[in-house]
């Protein structure tokens, strides 16, 4: 997702220009929220910037493994980091060495990302437009820890991305789709046939650390029937 005004060979020159250019300095508070960026395979992912300085990315790829399906790992679903003001925008860093930045340029917000070991003084490893999401339902985009339907098993991860896809690290085929219900709750339809309903608390969309009720229906069981399992979840 290249930019019409940004050529890879000019990335460093533009970086230098933006750092000293007279573009309006962004209000850090306005940068807080959910953004859409792209990885080095041109796959969209979401970067969530929180007011406490923490950051979280969620991503997933439909049918991510070639050959025999395998469960996805935590690192394939999410990454936690921290962010701070940087240049004409922000910089988010992660333990694995990746760096994502959002800069306010003449055509609006843009993304520059550097892979581990790269110098921030050099050209970015990938770049593209950065889009901030402001709709209410996008508040659900993020990562969740869900109690399994089989009580002897450990909790698993589920992530919701802004393109309507859902991924987990418990199923062999780990993808699905999610949609918002009329009552503000989220229904996930997993490719495995299971359905999961993340119930919206009375206080609104769950905040980090907040727990909420989750209902699950086995494959073939109507959503009009009682849930096959009633469990809990927690937002990460």
Image (cartoon, grey):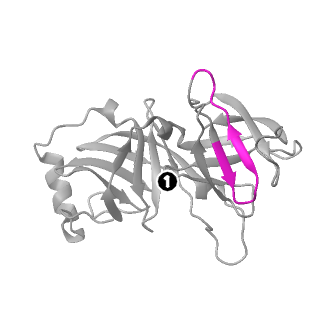
Quadrant containing the C terminus is top right
Is-magenta flag for residue 124?
no
Image point 71% across, 64% down: which residue? 173
Image point 64% across, 76% down: which residue? 66
Where residue 55 appears, x then y in whole percent? 47, 41
Image point 87% across, 41% down: which residue? 151
Tag 1 secondary structure: loop
Which residue occupies the extreme bottom position in the image? Answer: 67
Image point 37% across, 60% down: which residue? 114
Quadrant containing the N terminus is bottom left
Assess disc 1: are there few (<14), some (14-19) or many (≥20) residues with their C-alpha within 10 Å of its C-alpha. Answer: some
Instruction: Give 102 or 163, whichever is nearer the viewer.
Output: 163
Instruction: Give 104 or 174, whichever is nearer the viewer.
Output: 174
Q: Is residue 234 above or below residue 13?
A: above
Instruction: Give 226 or 57, whichever is nearer the viewer.
Output: 226
Q: Disc 1 marks which residue?
A: 163
Which residue occupies the extreme left position in the image? Answer: 22
Using the rendered image of the protein, determine whether residue 147 is visible from the camera's viewpoint.
no
Which residue occupies the extreme right position in the image? Answer: 152
Where residue 107 appears, x then y in whole percent? 19, 52
Q: State which region is magenta.
A: 187-203
Q: Is residue 77 above or below residue 146?
A: below
């Amino acid at each position: 997702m290249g930019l019409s005004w940004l050529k890879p060979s000019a990335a460093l020159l533009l970086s230098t220009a933006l750092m000293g250019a007279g573009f309006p300095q962004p209000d850090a508070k306005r940068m807080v929220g959910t953004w859409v960026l792209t990885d080095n395979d041109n796959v969209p992912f979401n970067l969530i910037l929180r007011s406490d300085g923490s950051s979280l990315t969620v991503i997933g790829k439909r049918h991510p493994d070639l050959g025999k399906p395998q469960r996805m790992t935590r690192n394939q679903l999410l990454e936690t980091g921290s962010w701070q003001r940087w240049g004409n925008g922000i910089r988010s860093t992660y333990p694995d060495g990746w760096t994502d930045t959002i800069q306010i340029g003449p055509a609006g917000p843009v993304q520059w990302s550097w892979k581990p070991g790269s110098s921030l003084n050099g050209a970015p490893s990938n770049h593209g437009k950065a889009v901030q999401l402001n709709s209410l339902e996008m508040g659900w985009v993020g990562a969740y820890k869900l109690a399994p339907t089989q009580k002897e098993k450990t909790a698993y991860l589920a992530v919701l991305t802004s393109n309507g896809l859902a991924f987990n690290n418990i199923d062999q085929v780990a993808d699905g789709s999610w949609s918002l219900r009329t009552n503000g709750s989220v229904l996930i339809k997993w490719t495995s046939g299971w359905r999961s309903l993340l119930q919206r608390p009375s206080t609104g969309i769950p905040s980090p650390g907040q727990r909420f009720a989750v209902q699950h229906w086995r494959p073939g069981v109507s959503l009009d029937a009682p849930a096959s399992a009633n469990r809990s979840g927690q937002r990460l």
